[in-house]
Image (cartoon, helix red, strand yellow):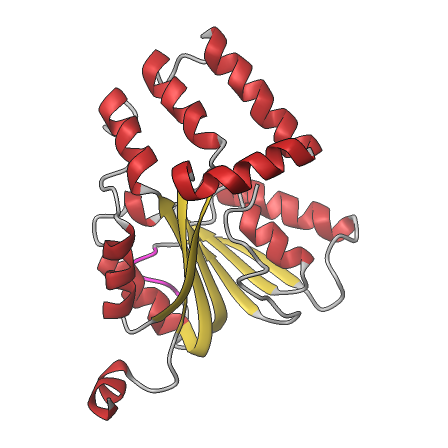
């Protein structure tokens, strides 16, 4: 289940891609399939080891084109172990809401992104996320949990302050918002509640089968209750200060 829309965020074979805070690796796997040179980085060693296993399995199964590469590694988003301008593309999906120094993370992403490179940032959307927080303290008051809720304008403002130029945004995963509302209402650790189990089956069916009815429904509902806000930006070829002076 991808949050980044690659029709709005084009990826070319050979692009150097950093999936920052890759988690289980869903975006890294898609980039690998598209022929990119992928680095999947996360601070969770257990998840990184699992991502590395999947990369190896994909290579053995011939799922990645010739020339594509994939590396999984542990690392700190605030101290990326890469030289300046190392990547053509950076993806950070559902990560920034966990990190106290989000401006520091943005600065590191800008540092390792080449001029003209592209960045995709996804975070939980303000409205649906606010409902979750209202229904359950346990949803967010956990170690490593969500520490903030972004409004779209706030996130876009921080992206601009970091020296990036936003060029598009959208919402995603509307069908997942009611699921999390049910989880929060019945208990985030209570997977046995009938409404939660029933809705989970619907989501699994939707992900596996991709029926037209749910695809159309989600597209219609995304602007209203999409669970994620997705923003796309580029790094200018000139420093932000120079651009400001020129204008």
Work out whether residue 129 or residue 58 is closer to the camera in this orientation and state it: 129
* Quarter placement of the C terminus: bottom left
The residue under the point 59% across, 71% down is: 15
Where does the N terminus fall, quadrant-wise? top right
The dominant secondary structure in magenta is: loop
Q: Position of residue 217 (x, y in %)?
A: 56, 34
Can you say whether 151 is above or below 140 in the image? below
- Is residue 101 placed above or below 13 in the rendered structure? above
Residue at x-position 42% and y-position 30%: 177
Question: Could you tell me which residue is drawn at 64 percent across and 44 percent down?
Answer: 54
Q: Quadrant of residue 137?
A: top left
Left or right relative to 67: residue 76: left
Q: Residue furthest front?
A: 220
Q: Is residue 27 above or below residue 148?
A: below
Q: Nearer the viewer, residue 37 or 199?
A: 199
Residue 143 picture location, percent across and down: 27, 32
> Can you tell which quarter of the image residue 79 is in?
bottom left
Q: Residue furthest bottom?
A: 246
Please provide the residue range marked out in magenta.
77-81
In front of the other: 184 or 31: 184
- Identify the residue shown where x is 40% and y is 39%: 224
Percent coordinates x, y for residue 173 in the rendering: 49, 39
């Amino acid at each position: 289940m991808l949050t980044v829309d690659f029709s709005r965020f084009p990826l070319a074979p050979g692009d150097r891609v950093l999936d920052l805070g890759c988690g289980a690796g869903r975006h890294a796997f898609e980039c690998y399939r598209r022929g990119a040179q992928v680095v999947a980085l996360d601070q969770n060693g257990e998840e990184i080891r699992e991502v590395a296993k999947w990369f190896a399995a994909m290579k053995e199964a011939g799922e990645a084109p010739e020339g594509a590469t994939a590396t999984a590694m542990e690392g700190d988003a605030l101290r990326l172990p890469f030289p300046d301008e190392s990547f053509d593309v950076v993806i950070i999906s559902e990560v920034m809401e966990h990190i106290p120094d989000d401006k520091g993370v943005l600065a590191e992403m800008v540092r390792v992104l080449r001029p003209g490179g592209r960045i995709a940032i996804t975070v939980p959307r303000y409205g649906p996320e606010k409902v979750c927080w209202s229904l359950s303290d346990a949803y967010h008051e956990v170690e490593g949990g969500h520490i903030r809720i972004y409004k779209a304008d706030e996130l876009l403002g921080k992206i601009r302050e970091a020296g990036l130029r936003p060029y598009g945004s959208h919402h995603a995963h509307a069908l997942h918002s009611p699921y999390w509302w049910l989880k929060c209402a019945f208990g985030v650790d209570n997977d046995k509640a009938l409404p939660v189990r029933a809705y989970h089956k619907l989501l699994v069916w939707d992900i596996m089968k991709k029926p037209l009815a749910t695809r159309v429904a989600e597209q219609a509902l995304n602007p209203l209750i999409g669970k994620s806000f997705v923003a796309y930006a580029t790094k200018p070829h000139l420093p932000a200060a120079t651009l400001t002076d020129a204008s």
